[in-house]
Each structure stands twice: as structure tokens, then as C-alpha cells.
Image (tube, helix red, strand yellow):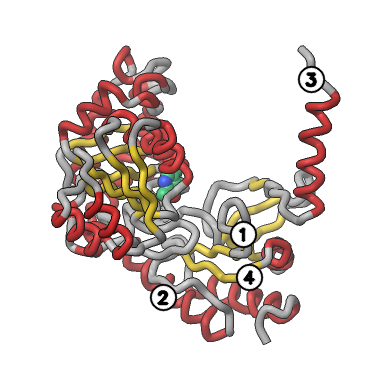
Amino acid sequence: MTYTKTAQKFYEDILTQKRNDGLFKEEYIITSPQGSWITVQFPEGAPEKRVLNLCSNNYLGLSSHPDIIKSAHDGLDKRGYGMSSVRFICGTQDTHRELEKKMSSFLGTEDTILFGSCFDANGAVFEALLTEEDAIFSDQLVHASIIDGERLAKKVTRFIYPHSDMTELEKLLKESNARIKMIITDGVFSMDGDIAKLDEITELAEKYQAMVFVDDSHSTGFIGKTGRGTAEYYGVMDKVDLITTTFGKALGGATGGCVSGKKEMIAMLRQAGRPYLFSNALMPAVVSATIKVLDILSENTDRRDKLAELAIFWRESLEKAGFELKAGNTPIIPIMLYDAKLAQDFARELFEEGVYVRGFFFPVVAQGQARIRTQMSAGLEKADLETALQSFIKVGKKLGVIK
Ligand SMILES: *Cc1c(COP(=O)(O)O)cnc(C)c1O
């Protein structure tokens, strides 16, 4: 045990620098269930404050829904707390298979494999499915977990095309003579809230015999007419080969993820996906609750429709007030501030006004691209947003962001 002075100082200096630069991320302590209204302590131990939450991934308002909680209880009562095993040893219950089948039918795919998280799902795919004869074509702005997954597949050639630049993607595909070509993109990009050009991507894929892999973590449940995701949005559900998504966002927001798609690739992942082989099976309560989420979403599109309406309303309200937004038409609505410290100050002032958002800055977004990312939820009401707008205007004027 030799935690040297040198090591200690190395870390201290970095942390001090982050604090001085206004880049230190502090956690606000939530003392209520997740929802549109939450109680928060900040700093830790301070009196609780009730605030409107505009920064969760609780897109469909299901995170604390009574029916979901009940299904989680059912799972706990009928199948126990934990599996104490990976799937292939003694960690597969009937409900794990039921969820995999439900997810396949929801997404219109052949088969599905569950993972402990979508981060793990993305960590499994490339290494298990590709070799040195193959190539990956990756959008520049894909999620960190995809980048890490690609890094694990060390022998696979990797091309990165500028964000949503179809001309560059085509050039790369044309020049490649790889055996398997895999195009990978986020469906909805989490920081900008824009939708990948899946219509054009699937066309290029056909033209150059490439596979299409979409991470729909910020889409599943609410993008597309019935919430099947970005492939449904573009009418190309039969042209996407592989989808990863998370249960940690719109689909109840607990934990877990999956890969869904062609059955041979799913079978390969059960044999060779390292996070699947070496990490614990999903807990039964999460499995039961996620099954219930899919049942609720298959009944009607009310939540998804309300979310879309609120997103339009909020975007238009902010624009009218003079804020600069990233263009888009998803429930992710970023307000551009460009300066990390300003983004932090903006969030802190809004918290005082009773609105909870966070400033995003490097390394979560590119240098000089700091912003407040607001996200809509079907759990919100228009009246909540009208009140929040007044707070945004007040703080915006105070900090010189709008006139
Ligand atoms: C959130 C997110 C993930 C990670 O999902 P977890 O289930 O929380 O690990 C992966 N990909 C994208 C695009 C995401 O937004």
C-alpha cells in the first residue's frame, strides 16, 4: 500500500484545476423519486428544494409510474432479488426470454439479447462480430460507449465520417473492400438532439453492401409514429440490421440494455459477447418492469404523442424568447451558451428559480460548445413549461444571454 505523495498531488492538482476552471461536476442530491417535480438538496445536506426537472431521460414519464413499480414488485416477489450468475451458467429465467421476445416484436427484429446496460451492449458488438477482414464506418458523434466498443475491436479497421456527412460516408464505403462493412450511428444524437439520416444511410448501405447498426438509446419508445425508433421514423425498419438500446432512459429508466437484430448475430453475441459472458444477468424486478413498459407502449401512443407536442411547444417558446437552440425535432432541446462557466452559472441561477437543468461542457461536448440541455418528458404539463420559461427569460437577461 504505497499511495505516494506524488500520486496524491497528481490527482489533487487536476481536481483543483477543474474547480478553478469552473469545470468541476458536482452532484445534486435528489431526495424524491424521479419525476417532473423532484426535491433536491444542494449542496449535500442543505434544506430540500422542490424543483421542476428538465434534464432527465425520463422521456415517457414512466420512471416512477405506479404500474411499472407494481410490475417490479411482482418480479421481486415471484423471481427473487438477484440472479448471482451470468446468463449462461444459471442466470436465465423465463422472464429474461420473455423480455427478449417482446423486445424483438416491439422493434420488428428477429431476436434480442439482454445486457446489463447499453454501454455493455455496445462494448460487446464490434469485438464479437468483426475481425481484421472487416471495417467499421462510424459517425463522428457516436456515443462514448460505441467509441469504447470500437477500441476493443483492435484488429478491425475503423473509419470515422464527419457528423451526418453522407458524401464522406459514401466515399469511404466506395473505397473499402472489407468483407463485412458495418455502418454505426446513434439514432438520435444525445447532445445535439438531431436524428441520423437513416434514409440515406440505408440507401448507401444497399448500394455498397454494408450492414446498418443503430444505437437508439435516445429514440426507442418515442421516435417514429408508434415509438419504434429512428428506423420507423424514416420507414426503414426492414433495412436496419442491428439495434442497441437502453432500458435506462424512456423505457422505465432503471438499468439494462439490449442488442436486437439478425438472429445469427444475436446468437454470436450469446457465444462471444464478453460483457454477456462475464457480467451478471439483469435483476428480475427490472426484467418484469421492462416487460410492462413494452406492454404499455404497445397499447397506445398517448405518451409519445404528448411528448412530441410538448417538445414543439418548448422549442418554439425558447426561440420566441430569443435563445439560440440546436436545430432539431426531438425532445432533446439544447440551449447554446458556448462557455463552460456561463453554462454552469446559468444552471445554478435556474436552480435558485426552481428549475433543475445542468450545464454541459467539455469533455461531454466539444470544446467551446457548452450548453444547457433541456429534455422534455410526457410527465410534464404545459403549465410547468410556461412557468419554467419565465425563469429562463429572467436568468437569460440577468446573464446577458438574451436581451
Ligand atoms: C445512454 C446511452 C448509452 C448507455 O446506456 P446505459 O444503458 O445507461 O449504459 C448508450 N448509447 C447511447 C446513445 C446513450 O445515449
User: Mark 3, residues whose alpha carbon is within 10 Å: few (<14), some, or many (≥20)?
Assistant: few
User: Mark 4, residues whose alpha carbon is within 10 Å: few (<14), some, or many (≥20)?
Assistant: many
Name the residue at 14% across, 54% down.
206
Residues at marks 4 and 3, CA–CA distance in whole angstroms: 40 Å
Q: Mark 3 and mark 4 in contact (Cβ < 8 Å)?
A: no
Q: Which is nearer the N-term, disc 2 or disc 3? A: 3
Vertical order, 211 against 130 (above or below): below
Q: Mark 3 and mark 2 in contact (Cβ < 8 Å)?
A: no
Q: Nearer the viewer, mark 1 or mark 3?
A: 1
Three-letter code, disc 2: Ile
Q: Which is nearer the N-term, disc 1 or disc 3? A: 3
Question: How many marks overall?
Answer: 4
Rendering quadrant holding ligand 1: top left
User: Residue 148 appears at what percent x and percent y?
Assistant: 46, 38
Residue 134 appears in which quarter of the rendering? top left
Residues at marks 1 and 3, CA–CA distance in whole angstroms: 33 Å
Q: Is residue 39 left or right of residue 46?
A: left
- Mark drawn on residue 337: 4
Residue at mark 2: 312
Residue at mark 1: 367
User: Mark 1, residues whose alpha carbon is within 10 Å: few (<14), some, or many (≥20)?
Assistant: few
Name the residue at 47% across, 63% down.
192
Three-letter code, disc 4: Leu
SS under mark 3: loop
Three-letter code, disc 3: Tyr
Q: Nearer the viewer, mark 1 or mark 2?
A: 1
User: Mark 2, residues whose alpha carbon is within 10 Å: few (<14), some, or many (≥20)?
Assistant: some
Residue at mark 3: 3
